[in-house]
Amino acid sequence: MSVVKFAIKGESKTATKFEAKARSFSFVIDEPGALGGTNEAPNPVEYLLGSLAGCLNIVVHLEAKEHNVIINKLKIDIDGDLDPAKFVGLPGFNRSGFQHININIILEADATEEIINAIINKAKARCPISDNISGVTQINYTVSNVFR
């Protein structure tokens, strides 16, 4: 199977608000008022958690289908603790990202506990967002300056 490229493009609207486009879709990223934003949309780390939940949803359903298991109900709750010190420019010992992420999967299906555990374990390994968060991914930055 060949590599598939995904991309977004976007533009800063304010110091905290960013408008992004992915394929034919648009979405806004903003911060809550307590962090200087206008609270018009989820913030970047909330989108990250939502992306993780969305990815797990897809892969759990794929795995269930491959195990001939019908999912009656699937809920995914995710939270994480983040130390904002570095983010706001203060010295800190903790990383600027999440210290840890907690995922609670509530799965109702007509399957044994062993099969459900196999589905979840395989889904964790197949989820691209989980892979990117838990492993090191090379990031290449290019900055284009426009001088006036």
Image (cartoon, rainbow, N blue to C red):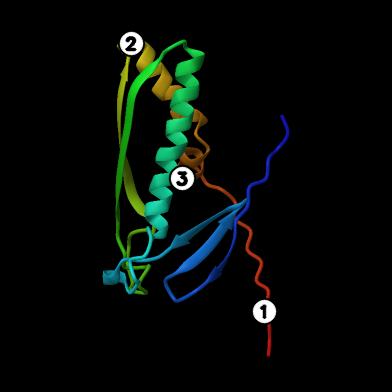
Mark 2 or 1: in front is 2
In the rendered image, the residue lying farthest to the right is: 2
Q: Amino acid at mark 2?
A: Asp
Q: Amino acid at mark 3?
A: Ile
Q: CA distance from mark 2 to mark 1?
A: 57 Å
Q: Secondary structure at mark 2?
A: loop
Residue neighbourhood size for the residue with mark 3, other residues' Cα within 10 Å, grouped as few (<14), some (14–19), many (≥20): some
Q: Secondary structure at mark 3?
A: helix
Identify residue for label 1: 145
Q: Which mark is residue 110?
A: 2
Identify residue for label 3: 133
45 in relation to 110, above or below? below
The residue under the point 44% across, 26% down is: 60
38 in relation to 116, above or below? below
Question: Dividing the picture into quarters, in which one does residue 29 lie?
Answer: bottom left
- Give how far across and how far down residue 141 sits, in percent: 63, 63
Q: Secondary structure at mark 1?
A: loop
Q: Is residue 88 left or right of residue 131?
A: left
